[in-house]
């Protein structure tokens, strides 16, 4: 009985443990937020510190405004990209994307310029207009 149990653990346990370092499917991860969160996706080389700092700062400075707009931040910097299965639409591309509730890309910039317009872009979306009418949350 013990031999059978050990054999079972070897055959089932080891393959399972080797999958613990499996890559995250970025498409599935994005889709996990569907109809609940809008996403700001940053995929950038680690030497582009200015864009990284501006994006990080945007989320710190505007935490209330971002929360009201249901913004989720996905940050993939440098070698972090090796932890993901990257969908074709982002392969070999760098920058900042705004992704809507439906999982579709709404805007993109190769630099930090999108951050200046992101709240305005969101606020013109039909669902956001409904949210604004229903919400009474204000940020200072």
Image: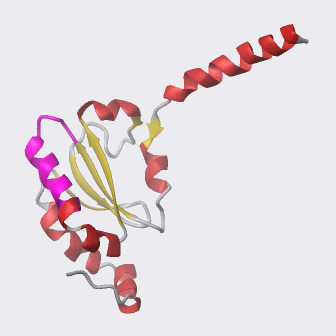
Q: Is residue 73 left or right of residue 46?
A: right
Q: Is residue 130 magenta?
A: no
Image quadrant holding the C terminus, namely: bottom left
Q: Is residue 77 left or right of residue 72?
A: left
Q: What residue appears at the point 37 percent right and 92 percent down from the top-left corner?
A: 133
Q: What residue appears at the point 21 percent right and 68 percent down from the top-left corner?
A: 62
Q: What residue appears at the point 21 percent right and 43 percent down from the top-left corner?
A: 94
Classify 89 as above or below 31: above
Q: Position of residue 97 (x, y in %)?
A: 26, 56
Image quadrant holding the N terminus, namely: top right
In the figure, residue 37 lies in which quadrant? bottom left
Q: Position of residue 122 (x, y in %)?
A: 28, 74
Of helix, strand and loop, which mostly describes the magenta segment? helix
Classify 26 as above or below 128: above
Q: Residue furthest left?
A: 50
Q: Is residue 35 left or right of residue 90?
A: right
Q: Position of residue 84 (x, y in %)?
A: 40, 36
């Amino acid at each position: 009985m013990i031999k059978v149990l050990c054999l079972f653990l070897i055959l089932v346990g080891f393959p399972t443990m080797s999958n613990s370092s499996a890559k995250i499917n970025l498409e599935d991860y994005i889709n996990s937020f569907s109809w609940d969160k809008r996403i700001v996706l940053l995929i950038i080389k680690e030497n582009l510190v200015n864009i990284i700092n501006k994006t990080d700062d945007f989320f710190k400075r505007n935490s209330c405004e971002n929360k009201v707009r249901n913004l989720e931040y996905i940050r993939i910097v440098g070698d972090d990209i090796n932890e993901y299965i990257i969908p074709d639409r982002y392969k070999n591309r760098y920058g900042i994307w705004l992704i809507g509730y439906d999982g579709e890309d709404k805007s993109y910039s190769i630099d930090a310029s999108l951050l200046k317009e992101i709240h305005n872009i969101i606020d013109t979306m039909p669902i956001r207009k409904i949210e604004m009418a229903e919400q009474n949350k204000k940020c200072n």
